Image (tube, rainbow, N blue to C red):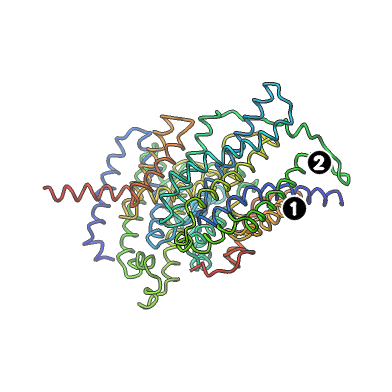
Amino acid sequence: MLAQVLTIILDGLNYASFLFIVSVGLTIVFGVLKILNVAHGAFYAWGAYAAAYAITQASELGYPDWIGFLLIFAASIIVGLVLGSIIERLILRKMYAQDEVLIALATFGLFLVLEDIILVVFGVDPYFAYQPMAVLGNVVIGGVFRDVYSLTLFALAVVVAVGCWWALTKTKWGKLIAVVIYDREISQAMGINVSAVYLIVFIVGAMLGALGGAYVAPTTSVAPGFGIDVIVLSFAVVVIGGMGSIPGALIGSVMVGVLRAIAVHQFPELELFVVFAVMAGVLIIRPEGLFAPPKARTI
Amino acid sequence: MIETLKKDKTVRWIILGFLALAITGNFMEAWVQNNIMFGLARGLAVLGLMVLWRTGLISFGHALYFGIGAYAVGLVDRNLGISDIFLRLIFAVGASAFVGFLLGFILRKYRGIFFAMLNLAFSMVLYGILVKVESLGSTDGFSVSQTTILGWAPENKYALFAAIVIACAIGAVLVQCYLKTALGSLTTAIRDNELRVEYLGFSVARAIHVKYVMSAGLAGASGALLAMALGQVDPDSMVNWPVSGELVFITVMAGPGSVIAPFLGGVVFEFLRTYAFELAPEAWQLIVGGTLLGIIFFLPMGLWSLLERIWKRRGVSS
């Protein structure tokens, strides 16, 4: 009994950490740029593919297995930097005046394009980059057998959360971002380089999406269609917590993670249902999300 | 309504165009016929989304009604043995419109991104159920037996093709008539200024609710026709979120200009997909997604606006 509860908690936290890393990027981009970025799922898939490709290549070349960790971070930074800057500069920049739903649709188009460029670049065969997971081995916690790698995911989520909090509240850039969120035009008039803020925020968001994918890559097979399920799940997380709110993304991912873990272990047929039922429920009762400051945005 | 039927130019064009299509359909190659059939069936759902879009609403979850329509056909076929196209359509439209009516009470309060997301959440709830229910075939779905028309079991696909063409023509005419009524002409008015509409003495919530139920019923009919054309239902190609994305994509590609546009868009999408798949089997989504971006950027009012422009230019020169 106790072991089962512990398994559910560990699974839930593991899943929550993963969801948090992915959805915090989505929520930051929504909070600052007011864009619901469907292409975030493609950043996730790109991160996973880039990391898996780099790790398998490094392994074939005879590098030690721990180098995989460096490659995971390198891959997500490169993917975020390249894709993020290209997309923001060339496409989104020209769309900010448009209706937000239309921008979301444009990012859906981008999602389709980026998903297929993956197939062209990396091929259709799945990648197995298990080395970083194998190098850490396993551990027994309270009678429950776990791999250490999934525990490091939790640590990474904590680092990301603290990092975001620190960057947004303690640095000059964080304060600039807060000002830009509050009023874009006034901040531009005050001499803040709004377009630079947008670019940087979008790149950071893309990096976080890619990091989520890159860090998950070693635990599974990276195959076509990798980003499809993730994008709606992180939508659910972001909506539950409140779009644009980082604490909201944290609470949302813990809720979704734990609920899903309970469902998977106790009521497997409810696995997806429970997540989206909660999302619908939150939207009905508090459309601005559980932890966002209430704003009259429904009408 | 009868006035509209007699006088409206669009109604005449719909009847002429669809009649021509129904006749020429018999002489088409099988794959062309199939593509047009699928495109038109999808166009029916797009028609409903277009009415919502004119009101300023975009739904990222109409796969919900699409799926309800498709599964309704599958279920009445499997459990009641109903194979008649009219009965199947009645069940499908009834079920989806009923769900749309109930959810409409909640959804009519939402606008913008919240409307889109709440629809998405509802459709994913249905998807989450369908992929797990073993008796409905979970992720594989199940097959639908051949469709009959008033007890007659046609030998080739042409009969179904003609039936779909007629169903789409009826849908287009009805929506055109609706748009000419007072409630129907509130579409763009609501998008431009809700407050003024309220001051004119109309209930915005009720107007949106009616349009929502209509779009749900149309999406249900669309899913039902597609299920019959494919002879099979499954969650991933009928209820998952990319299906909703595709429907919105066709809506934007076709443009809000006319009730004929959704069907044109549906057929163009089907051919675009076929050719993209032919050209680059591993990268067809790239072409489809690129087209979507191109349309949003360079043709914000859709393909229909392009046709209109050509039409007008010719009118001036001659």
Residue that sits furthest to the top in the current view: A61
Vertical comparison of A126 with A112: above or below: above
Mark 2 belongs to which subunit? Answer: A
Q: From this viewpoint, is residue B6 visible?
A: yes
Q: From this viewpoint, is residue A274 visible?
A: no
Real-space Cα separation, disc 1 to disc 2, in angstroms: 17 Å
Residue at point 66%, 33% (across, down)? A71
The answer to which of marks 1 and 2 sits earlier in the sequence is 2
Residue at point 41%, 60% (across, down)? B52
Q: Residue A295's quadrant in the figure?
A: bottom right
Q: Residue A137's quadrant in the figure?
A: top right
Residue bearing mark 1: A262
Q: Is residue B225 left or right of residue A49?
A: left
Q: Is residue A26 left or right of residue A187?
A: right
**Residue A117's x, y, as percent?**
50, 34
Residue at point 41%, 69% (across, down)? B207
Front-most of residues A187 and A234: A187
